[in-house]
Image (cartoon, rainbow, N blue to C red):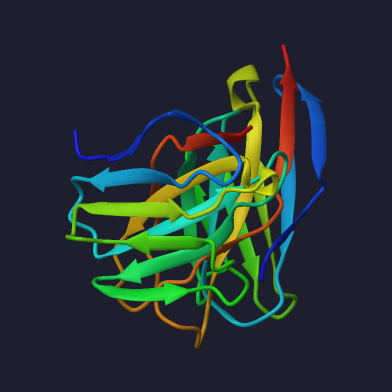
Amino acid sequence: SQQGEEDPQALSIQEGENATMNCSYKTSINNLQWYRQNSGRGLVHLILIRSNEREKHSGRLRVTLDTSKKSSSLLITASRAADTASYFCATDTRGSTLGRLYFGRGTQLTVWP
Amino acid sequence: DAMVIQNPRYQVTQFGKPVTLSCSQTLNHNVMYWYQQKSSQAPKLLFHYYDKDFNNEADTPDNFQSRRPNTSFCFLDIRSPGLGDAAMYLCATSTYRQSNEKLFFGSGTQLSVL
């Protein structure tokens, strides 16, 4: 069964604007990861945040994690047309059988030049 | 470069005709996954191998089987494909220490069922 659910399902912005995507999940986690997928391709890992971390940065990406609310957000600053893709969160459920990683439905981000 | 390779990129099969999708990795990762992704949906975990241990998801149909003959290769067998099995099939690898580390995905195999 799926763990994460992203919000919004679709987001359309202009180049230079910031994009914020949210992810909610249901059970306790070991870590939460964000991935990007260009149309018709495999997923690419963006960033991993562990359950004992609250914020993490990587280049133009900023991820926050609130375990009390079971939610995470991904912020892309100064967006570019090349950021157009689907973004997924994935969770590694604490206590589950080793190796399971579940994905949410994703947010389709469109950045207009 | 170390990577995850899926072949073929596109696969067309007939309704009910068995088909095998392949995945290879040069990362020497101990965990390999198969995900099914239908259009505009989340990747759905079918099963995964932790080393040689096979872990099936409860809702994965019996029609789907997998083999991992060695660390580098993993196969997805669909015994009798139905129209509903048309999807992108994604292979991924990772290491597992105290929790899952990041996944490395192949480019996927787009399966069409006629």
Specify the farthest residue to the bottom: A95
Which image quarter is the N terminus of chain A in? bottom right
Image position of B39 (left or right of B105): right
- The answer to whether residue A17 of the structure is visible from this angle is no
- The answer to whether residue B54 of the structure is visible from this angle is yes
- The answer to which of B17 and B34 lies nearer the viewer is B17
In the displayed structure, would residue A57 be above or below residue A44?
A: below
Image position of B13 (left or right of A74): left
Image position of B109 (left or right of A68): left
Residue B16 placement (x, y as % from top left): 57, 47
- Identify the residue at horizontal 63%, vertical 41% (top origin): B86
Residue A112 placement (x, y as % from top left): 75, 16
Which image quarter is the C terminus of chain A in? top right
Specify the farthest residue to the top: A113
- Identify the residue at horizontal 43%, vertical 62% (top origin): B65
**How many numbered circles are shown?**
0
Residue A81 placement (x, y as % from top left): 65, 18
- Identify the residue at horizontal 57%, vertical 48% (top origin): B81
In the displayed structure, would residue B114 be above or below residue A100?
A: above
In the displayed structure, would residue B29 be above or below residue B57?
A: above
Image position of B41 (left or right of B106): right
- Identify the residue at horizontal 66%, vertical 81% (top origin): A27
Residue B95 placement (x, y as % from top left): 29, 64
